[in-house]
Amino acid sequence: MKRLGVIGGMGPEATSDLFLKIIKNTPAKNDQEHIPIVIDNYPQIPDRTAFLKGLGESPLPFLLESVTRLEKCEVDYLCMPCNTAHYFVNEIREYTDIPFLSIVESTLEAIISNGKKYKKIGLITTDGTLIGKIYHKVFEKKNIEIKDFDKDIQQNIMDCIYLVKAGEKDKAAEIFAKTYSEIIDNGFECLIAGCTEIPVLLPFVDLSLADVYDATELLAQKAVSVCLKG
């Protein structure tokens, strides 16, 4: 069994969501059968979307600082429950010899494994993830196209994300439910919850209306799989 290191705090509730999903996806019958995890909850990492919009400090030095702390804890794998921060995945992999589990790659693997040929895939995520084409670039390598939402829908998504970060989940859920309905009405048959705040809002919508891939859940499953194999 291997030890997992989590670059966390982006935001704290999203990190907690990943931790709980790792526990839920572990076929453990007692405490000792769960995988060992070290979480570096570091909320002071600068806003990723602000940086990609040219409005803030680079998160990269802070991300690498977190990696250094986790290296000292002798973790065997790294992961990061923040989709936008995956803009720096190459720099992280170059910085450390510890294998890094990508939330984007885990999601792509799941969609390919499903075997369905979707006509319209939507990505529910931050402006920063869209600006950095963090999913688009990885998916295009497998000839899978992601179609963007219109500006109003995207703004509503951003509002929901920052409301969750602010602890206003009920208000976020109300906006998200209406936005989700608009997305479905626009013909999207496959949706990726590609911001780690979004899965917190999924219980408030009808998930039977589209195939919804919870990127956090898929990362949790990947982490459990590789750590248990070890």
Image (cartoon, rainbow, N blue to C red):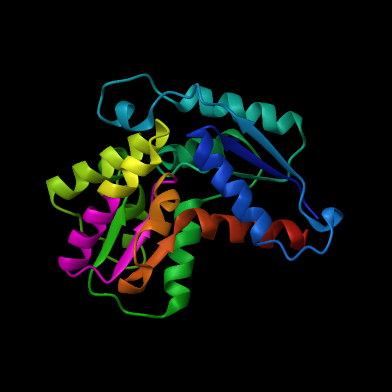
Residue occupying image coordinates x 65% and y 27%: 68
The front one of 71 and 122 is 122
Residue 173 in the image: above or below residue 145: above
Q: Quadrant of residue 145?
A: bottom left
Residue 109 counted in the magenta span: no
Task: Judge from the rendering whether residue 69 lies leftward or rightward of residue 128; answer left or right.
Answer: right
Q: State whether residue 34 appears in this view.
A: yes
Task: Judge from the rendering whether residue 80 lies leftward or rightward of residue 183; answer left or right.
Answer: right
Q: State whether residue 126 appears in this view.
A: no
Q: Quadrant of the N terminus?
A: bottom right
- Residue interval drawn in magenta: 176-196
Residue 150: percent from left, percent from top? 13, 51
Residue 190 counted in the magenta span: yes
Residue 138: percent from left, percent from top? 38, 56
Q: Quadrant of residue 115?
A: bottom left
Residue occupying image coordinates x 16% and y 67%: 185
The front one of 188 and 13 is 13
The front one of 48 and 9 is 9
Residue occupying image coordinates x 20% and y 41%: 155
